[in-house]
Image: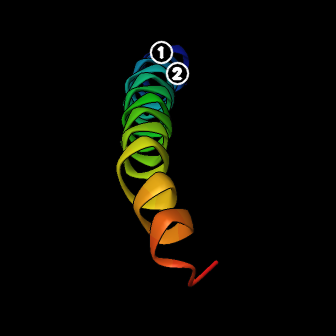
Amino acid sequence: AVLTTTLAWSHNKTTLSRMKTSLTHVRITYKSIQKAVIPQTVKEGRF
């Protein structure tokens, strides 16, 4: 039982860190999209 718990725990930790990484990636992508797209949109008056 202890072994399975440890395995599940390490798997959860891996999944969590993966989620954190992808969240950070999404945030960075979103920020760069904001920087790239929004000024352009405002300039063209589509905002």
Q: Nearer the viewer, residue 43 or 9?
A: 43
Q: Nearer the viewer, residue 32 or 4?
A: 32
Can you give x and y, in whole percent of width and height, for residue 28 in the image?
A: 41, 32
In the displayed structure, would residue 9 be above or below residue 8?
Answer: above
Can you give x and y, in whole percent of width and height, for residue 2 in the image?
A: 54, 15
Label 2: few (<14), some (14–19) or many (≥20) C-alpha neighbours in 10 Å:
few
Query: Residue at coordinates 57% horizontally, 79% vertically from top-left?
Result: 45
Secondary element at tag 2: helix
Figure disc tally: 2
In the displayed structure, would residue 21 be above or below residue 3?
Answer: below
Query: Residue at coordinates 39% horizontally, 29% vertically from top-left?
Result: 11
Residue 9, labelled with which disc?
2
Can you give x and y, in whole percent of width and height, for residue 34 in the image?
A: 49, 49
Q: Amino acid at mark 1?
A: Thr
Residue 6, labelled with which disc?
1
* Quadrant occupied by the C terminus: bottom right
Alpha carbons under labels 2 and 1: distance apart: 5 Å
Label 1: few (<14), some (14–19) or many (≥20) C-alpha neighbours in 10 Å:
few
* Quadrant occupied by the N terminus: top right
Q: Amino acid at mark 2?
A: Trp
Mark 2–mark 1 contact, CB under 8 Å?
yes
